[in-house]
Image (cartoon, helix red, strand yellow):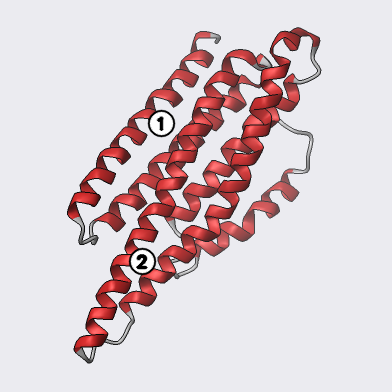
Amino acid sequence: MSNDKDPQQLAEATGTFASRVAEGTPTPGGGSVAAYCGQLATALGVMMCNLTIGRAKYADAEVRVIAIKNELEALGTEFRSLIDEDAASFESVLAAYRHPKETEQQKAERRRLIQDSLQRAASTPYHTAELSVRTLKLLAELARSGNTNALSDVATAGQVARAAARGACYNVLVNLSGLGDRESADRIKSQVSDLMADSQRLSEEIEALIVTQT
């Protein structure tokens, strides 16, 4: 479903963030992009809610759709915060590696800073992945009860949310590789695997709905 808006204006609205990503700097990177994808997925879900609420055909589902809309809007706000949070967490990793290491005390402090920053840099995208799966669960419900004219939009949202989840998980894994606490790292890896599997299952569930209707 398309909106009656000037395509040129829409393209310009997306340009700033894309340009920042394209710059030759480590941030914003994949983690921020994953969070942005999550925000876009929630926006498409809210769009379907707005196209469903107030329609007599979907009156029986309206109360639940309103609740889904509220949840998606809250998730969208969290994703927006995570765009900057992810960039900041990785900047802290870079700062930790730049810490002086001339004395033994400095070396010990540098090791501590690196471990703390890697933990933060892993936990931030992990949160993005968790929220992405929560978003997918809401989208899957919406795909079954919302306005069928917007089913393609929710199916698109499902794929974008899946990309958000998987992209975030990739960033978790790369930061876990340097974590000294291997027991903790292995536990988080297992949880990441579950999140990736959930994101695939839910996005395919949504996709199946549009395939069967065409």
61 relative to 207 in the view: left or right: right
Quadrant of image for the N terminus: top right
Q: Is the residue marked by circle 1 packed among few (<14), some (14-19), or many (20+) residues within 10 Å?
A: many
Q: Where is residue 23? Give x, y as percent.
A: 49, 67
Identity of the residue drawn at 72% across and 18% down: 63
Say which mark, if any, is on residue 35: none
Image quadrant where residue 166 sits: top left
Q: Which residue is mark 2?
A: 117
Image quadrant where residue 156 sits: top right
Q: Secondary structure at mark 1?
A: helix
Image quadrant where residue 182 sits: bottom left
Q: Where is residue 118? Give x, y as percent.
A: 33, 63
> Spatial distance from mark 2 to mark 1, Cα to Cα?
27 Å
85 relative to 96 in the view: left or right: right
Residue type at the position of mark 2: Ser
Q: Where is residue 134? Give x, y as percent.
A: 50, 33
Q: Is the residue marked by circle 2 packed among few (<14), some (14-19), or many (20+) residues within 10 Å?
A: many
Q: Nearer the viewer, residue 28 or 67?
A: 67
Labels 2 & 1 near each other (Cβ < 8 A): no
Q: Secondary structure at mark 2?
A: helix
| Front: mark 2 or 1 | 2
Identity of the residue drawn at 27% across and 55% down: 176
Q: Which residue is mark 1?
A: 199
Identity of the residue drawn at 48% across and 38% down: 132
Q: Nearer the viewer, residue 6 or 134?
A: 134
